Image (cartoon, coloured by chain):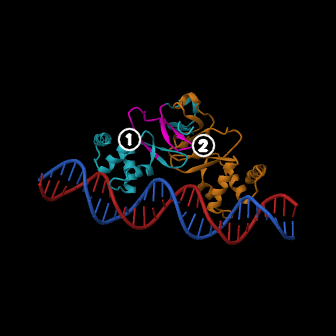
Chain colours: A orange, B cyan, C blue, D red
Amino acid sequence: MPNTFETAAEKMIRQCGGRVTTGRVRILAVLLTEQQAITHREIEQRLLGKQSLDRVTLYRVLEWLTNKQLIHKVVSDDRVWRFHANHELHSHQHAHFKCNSCASVICLDKLPNERDWSLPVGYQFQEIELTVKGLCAKCV
Amino acid sequence: MPNTFETAAEKMIRQCGGRVTTGRVRILAVLLTEQQAITHREIEQRLLGKQSLDRVTLYRVLEWLTNKQLIHKVVSDDRVWRFHANHELHSHQHAHFKCNSCASVICLDKLPNERDWSLPVGYQFQEIELTVKGLCAKCV
DNA sequence: CTATTAATGCAACAATGTTGCAACTAGTAT
DNA sequence: ATACTAGTTGCAACATTGTTGCATTAATAG
């Protein structure tokens, strides 16, 4: 029932006051379907069968969705952005796990608190980016 | 007295059982001089005045030094590797701070401990990559 | 339905990093 | 000191990821 995701996506986009275009809906629907953070390239592949979508458009839609906070992006040690839909359960700030074997990325809920990484004097904290690496359940 | 760093670099490389080439010595010396993690490009610029060094060689030397654990690399949200010499004071695993204004990167000593980001069942921890972001003392 | 403006597609570019291969050189043996 | 050999280097070409400018298209308001 993929339509469910498409209608949800459409609703989310409309609520942001943005134009509801097929590209945005389909891309957000893909991200809503995924349990894990996926790359630009993986999104492209999931859209292959259907009507084509330009590479650049995909980049721009992802940027737009990120700005609207409908999705968020993660960078990992392979220097590739990965994107994930912002389900309600995730607080805005959270950690990620990346499998060293299959490169899959999931979101973790907990974040370490500030006493664990105190900054030098004069430094001001703004945000934290934490990636835990290891093996996922499939690859263990 | 930059020679101090060059001789230290030379000694470190020799201890690893690797060939002592001028490229390796000069690159490692640059990294030993720096207090913070710097990019491939920044290293290139610091070597400009002296006898030229190929871009590719720089990449390969950095890879070699990383494998030998004489330096370590950090990825941050601009998708660019940054390199830093492994001074004794830093444990192999540690966190980094990146300034959101000037993009400078320094190493932090503390690491959050495992209870702060428990993994799902079946997942196996291997390493942790933590970047705290904010403003450095100069940019506050 | 039309007008307006945001969104798209295309082409070209930019930045970062990688690969193959011939030429060179540090360390070693003679 | 000289020659040998394997590890390094330089060059050219390529790969990947992401960005910019601009003309065209399409979503919404009226």
Direction from residue C5 to residue B112 in the image, left or right:
left
Q: Residue at x 62, y 49 (%)?
A: A83
Q: Which element type, helix, strand or loop, lies under badge 2?
A: strand
Q: Residues within 10 Å of mark 1 (few under 14, many from 20)?
A: some
Mark 2 vs mark 1: in front:
1
Q: Which residue is mark 1?
A: B33
Direction from residue A34 to residue A132 in the image, left or right:
left
Q: Position of residue A15 (x, y in %)?
A: 78, 49
Residue A117 belongs to magenta span: no
Direction from residue C5 to residue B121 in the image, left or right:
left
Q: Position of residue C30 (x, y in %)?
A: 11, 53
Q: CA distance from mark 2 to mark 1?
A: 38 Å
Q: Residue at x 29, y 46 (%)?
A: B18
Q: In terms of depth relative to the viewer, which is nearer, A72 or B100?
A: B100
Q: Position of residue B5 (x, y in %)?
A: 32, 40
Q: Residue at x 37, y 51 (%)?
A: B47
Question: Can residue A120 be seen?
Answer: yes
Residue A109's disc is: none
Q: Position of residue A37 (x, y in %)?
A: 61, 47
Marks 2 & 1, CB-CB < 8 Å contact: no
Question: Can residue A46 be seen?
Answer: no
Q: What residue type is disc 2 on?
A: Ile
Q: Chain of mark 1?
A: B
Q: Which element type, helix, strand or loop, lies under badge 1?
A: helix
The mark total stands at 2
In this view, the residue farthest toward the top is: A115
Q: Which residues are magenta?
A: B82-109
Q: What residue type is disc 1 on?
A: Thr
Q: Residues within 10 Å of mark 2 (few under 14, many from 20)?
A: many
Q: In terms of depth relative to the viewer, which is nearer, A88 or A73?
A: A73
Q: Which residue is mark 2?
A: A106
Q: Are marks 2 and 1 on the same chain?
A: no
